[in-house]
Amino acid sequence: MNNYQPYYSDNSDQALDTRVSQVMKRVYVKMFLGLLVTAFVSLWCVQTPAVISFFATHSWSMWVLIAVELGMVFAISGGINRLSSSTATLLFFLFAVVNGLMLFPIFFAYTSTSIAKTFFITAGVFGAMSVYGYFTSQDLTKIGSFLIMALFGLIICVVVNMFLKSSTMEWIISFAGVIIFIGLTAWDTQQIKRMALMAPTDTVSKLATLGALSLYLDFINLFLYLLRFFGSSRD
């Protein structure tokens, strides 16, 4: 998230603070709408027998969705400067739709009550860390770099455990995932704030989309890892 170069003007500190506040509001609104889209798509899938039957008989479809998600993430984050604001926003909400298709199986694995409980726990933790990232005077750059490396290590461990199928390793991965995405929430928030201070006015909408995507991913991943601890199995 460093595609923007410093932008200098004669704006007062108050004007800059106002712009940052406006950018952050747009980031959180877009992120919230993205979460709503994902939730509605997942609930629709759960209530649609044809969708359930399709995914149950075509296991490869989940791998296709994973590939599509990765492509969208790279398209938005890597090509944000080339995309129009409307295209970037459209891709973000399409990503939210695809993620809804990916996540609906959790409603068959966990009880609705435990999913709702975990969602509110996630919202509380996410909110606290995002507020910290916004207001802290501490530079989180070094911590962020470490967390990114840890995230790559986590992904490798997840892939390895797909073959090992170790329950102990799964719990370790879940614990590490919670810690990593708690830290990334604070770091991403600080990065978005800094970019809002430097970005030209005509790029604000794109920045809001990029920021919403980053925080959306932090929230979803934190939710999924916390679900391992707070989710109640239907079995």
Image: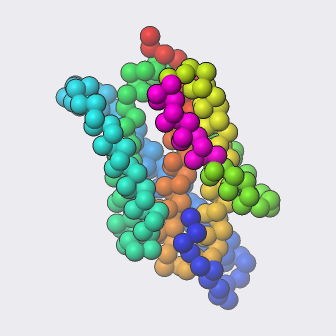
Q: Is residue 56 visible?
A: yes
Residue 212 vertical placement versus 121 (above, below): below
Is residue 155 within the magenta segment? yes
User: In x, y percent, where is residue 209?
Assistant: 47, 62
Q: Quadrant of residue 228?
A: top right
Number of marks in the image?
0
- Identified at 66% across, 68% down, the residue is 194
User: In x, y percent, where is residue 11?
Assistant: 67, 84
Q: Quadrant of residue 144?
A: bottom right
Is residue 118 within the magenta segment? no
User: In x, y percent, where is residue 175?
Assistant: 65, 31
- Identified at 64% across, 57% down, the residue is 189
Closer to us: 123 or 186: 186
In this image, 141 relative to 108: left or right? right
Q: Is residue 116 visible?
A: no
User: In x, y percent, where is residue 182?
Assistant: 66, 43
Could you tell me what secondary structure mostly forms the magenta stretch?
A: helix
Indicate how the structure is coloured in the image. Answer: rainbow
- Identified at 50% across, 23% down, the residue is 165
- Identified at 44% across, 69% down, the residue is 80
Residue 47 vertical placement versus 70 (above, below): above
Q: Where's the N terminus, which quadrant?
A: bottom right
Highlighted magenta segment, given as a residue range: 150-164
